[in-house]
Image (cartoon, coloured by chain):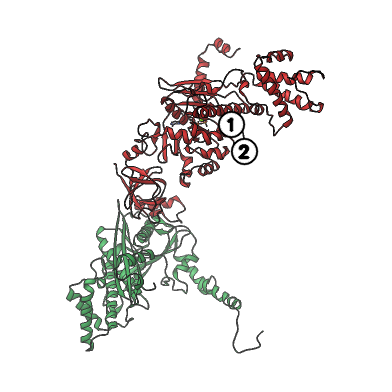
Amino acid sequence: MESEVLGRIAPNSTPVQAEMIAYAGVVPKVGDYVVVDSEESKLLGMISNVVRGALELARNDLLQANYYDTILEVVGSPSDWLKATIRMIGILSGGELTGLPRAPPPTGALVRRAPADLLRRIFAPPTGREGIRLGKLLTRGDVTVHLDPDELISRHLAVLAVTGGGKSNSVAVILEEIVRMGGVAILFDVHSEYTGMSLGCPHCEVETVDPVLDPNTLTVDELGSLLGVTYDSAPKQFIYLKSAFKRAKELLIRERLGEYLTRAEIEADRDDLLAGIQAIIQLSLSREKESDDRFLIPFPSNDRGSIESLLAKVDFVRSKYGRVLKPTAGELADHLNYGKLVIVDLGQLDSDLTDVVVGKTLYTILMRAKLKRIGRGYEDFPTPVFAVLEEAHALIPSIERTYTSSAAASIAKEGRKFGVGLCLVSQRPKRLNPDVLSQMVNKIILRVVEPEDQAYVRRATEFLSEEMVSYLPSLDVGEAVVVGPMVRIPALVKVRLFEGKRGGESLKAYDMWREGLRRRLNASPDEYYDSIGG
Amino acid sequence: MKVESELPFESIEEAVIEARSRISSFLFPRSGVEGDALLSVIRREWRSGIGQGSVERIAAIDGSNNSEYLTLGQVIFAVSASFFMKDTEPVVARKYQIGVMDDYHYRERVSLCRETMELKMALRSLELGPEILLMDGSFLAMVDRGLWSTPYGQKVPYHMRRILREVESTLGLNLTEGLVSYTHLVNLMGKIEEIVASVLEEESGKPPQRDEIRRAMAFIERYEVLCSLNELLRRGRSVLVAVAKRSSSRLYFNSRLPDMEVVRRYTSLEPGYLSPKVVELSFPEYSGIDDTYPISLTYVRLERATSPLRVEVVGNVDESVLEELLGSLARYSVRGYPYHLRRVHELAKIGRDLMSHLSRNLLIPEVSGRERLGE
Ligand SMILES: Nc1ncnc2c1ncn2[C@@H]1O[C@H](COP(=O)(O)OP(=O)(O)OP(=O)(O)O)[C@@H](O)[C@H]1O
Ligand SMILES: [Mg+2]
């Protein structure tokens, strides 16, 4: 029924919120949309809470259910009453949504369920464009919700939920839609959750790349944070690092770095800057007093200890990250293209390196987008870019400043102008840097259980009412509160299941064990012992 | 300190201490002749435990009334009577009577109106064939209203008989019919007043005072209760049961303590009841009603650790019949009170809120705002 009557407005309504008394037999549902007949216009609202009672059972001395039995036996079914809280969303005029009402709806005003075609219009893709098909309204299986890609990019996105709440699935759905449109996306996959992901459209390309870091492209500061040597924490070491860096750079340009590597007996590529730095420090420590090699660093003898520990750090990082540090590997941003998703598989890296890889890539993307925009090069750099960070609370924590968090803060601030959209995915919202989170104006909030997380999400989110927050723990997997300019009005959405292939779905322990056991029992003893290497 | 004086100057503490022992022996005569005598009566008459009853068609009736000053000399009143019966489906009925009356003994008259409506509702519902019809209160108390028995006390002038006869015959009225009180019906009130005035004038030879007319009207209201009750007892007999939660009656034990207090204090917390005591219900002489009815009176605790109830069953019922009846009530009792009665109570209830809503919103618009008293 299109204009199903639900109830009437009770006294004490405000322009923001009203209570509705329901007609007998009507059970309003949280998250459903309603239309309130106001004086001149109609108001659109959302049911944010429903309270129910029964007249016959409304006594506080009935402290054993046996009394309920007796009463129900006598009266048959109790006279239910229902009271719903309605949050006002906007004024409807001619099927169009305009600003928030300035006056409360009249007491006694009729409240109807919002007709499906109205909602379809509201959640349709923006006119003349395609939308991101996210899913269906939770309370209306017949209304599809689309997100506006322009708003998504320019106002960023946070996807928040407990683990297993359906964050990665939501991200996969959005990425698929973006790439299908021709969008440019990069996903930092901290737990190798998306490796082997494929999208279901002919022109969609997915490239999984190993994180490589070209040391030659690093700045001294980036290098410093990789080594754990910053001006603040170890000023002496940082100064020597800077000298060594400058000298190694010059040698690289003069194509003389190989010479020093040989002298220091370091096996490395002739243009490996970090190896060159190591060589210079090492040779400086062991040089003869009278040496006039200007590429070695002179130092007073009491600085020897500092320089030795700097050398140890460089050596350690080189051997530890050898696989990742690839001179002349280029930038991850080089892989970006239209209609393509780049997945950076960070699963093998530790957090320090992850921080540098992600932070550096974000800075690079922002810088290139900026230069392109102001016409100073990078004309071919594909923009706008949508960058997704899984485990954002680890990369952008609230307690310390990381390289990635500075990069993210810059994008949050400037990305809008240059076409870089950020998407933060986290299961511990309260550990996420609040300044950055609050700039993610669009939000997809799935199941959130922890009260502190709830409170945090509420503070960072405009429309979210107390009642809606209390409703978050009871959301099922894939059910989400969606707010922000990417939807025209806040919505409770059942996110659709990503149709393509994605790694990282929940393990099916039982099936895997059964299958393993079946294979073990079917295998001949020889094969079995072969397979376990016996 | 005051020096010796003729007049005392007590402190409240002294007075309390002095009074305390007297008060407690008055309230708790656990020992002494009275206490011991009561205990032995209880031991003899109290039946521990109540069996399972099997009566299903239990109905209940209750009413409610409320009133509020509208002008300096007039009140608005609202009275209701409601009915509930558990059949295969629950059956409910409710009737309101709302009006305005002079503030002449208005509290008594409003409760008379309620009694009339409850009795008439009961009369009409007999057709539905309930096996038990529960009423809130006491039949005995209805005939014996204590001090305010009639506006004339017990000495009702002889000419009232004539007035009643003329009202009934001139208007062709049977006061036990319908669902509301006739004297408050707007279209009848004027006619009845005319009859009253003309009889009074004939009796005394001069035009009656306004108060005289009002007094006679109030008597008719009282009479309406009595004849409706008589009609109900006559027709309803075996199914009628009155249940009271509160009562100061001393009819059973004839003790200084009210019966209910005796049962509350001297019986265990377990369910049980007193063997019925049969008393006779007769109507006051001024009513001219000669019929009498036996009433079986008992006190019962329907559920463990709940307050006892006073129960009147119309007729001379033996103990097995009584136990079956009480067992059926216990089966549908919630916190020691028959749920059917609770239900009708809730249906009938006329609260303060409803009253002010009525007088503010539903009455003649001219009588509003400042014209109402106290605003
Ligand atoms: N919209 C949905 N409809 C149906 N099932 C879903 C939906 N979203 C997620 N699921 C199921 O729930 C499981 C977990 O989802 P997902 O991996 O997206 O959770 P997550 O929040 O990313 O978890 P984690 O924090 O562990 O990364 C998946 O296996 C998927 O099958
Ligand atoms: Mg995930």
Please name the color used to draw chain A: red
Kindly tell me whether residue A163 is visible in this rendering. no
Q: Which residue is mark 1?
A: A404
Task: Assign a secondary structure to mark 2.
Answer: loop
Residue under the image location 49 percent in, 68 percent down: B40
Q: How many other residues sit within 10 Å of disc 1, few (<14), some (14-19) or many (≥20)?
A: many
Q: Which mark is residue A515?
A: none
**Which one is nearer the viewer's eye here, A158 or B21?**
A158
Question: Which quadrant would the C terminus of chain A be assigned to in this image?
Answer: top right
Q: Which residue is mark 2?
A: A399
Task: Assign a secondary structure to mark 1.
Answer: helix
Badge nearest the viewer, 1 or 2: 1
**Which one is nearer the viewer's eye here, B374 or B43?**
B374
Q: Are marks 1 and 2 in contact (CB under 8 Å)?
A: no
Q: Provide the letter of the chain coloured green.
A: B
Residue under the image location 38 percent in, 64 percent down: B353
**Percent x, y for residue B39?**
50, 68
Q: Are marks 1 and 2 on the same chain?
A: yes
**Percent x, y for residue A92?**
34, 45
Q: Chain of mark 2?
A: A
**Percent x, y for residue B197?**
22, 82
Q: Is residue A433 above or below residue A110?
A: above
Question: Horizontal placement of B33 versus B338: left or right?
Answer: right
Q: CA distance from mark 1 to mark 2?
A: 13 Å
**Percent x, y for residue B57?**
31, 55
Q: Residue B169 sits in which quadrant?
A: bottom left
The amino acid type, in three-letter code, at marker 2 is Ile
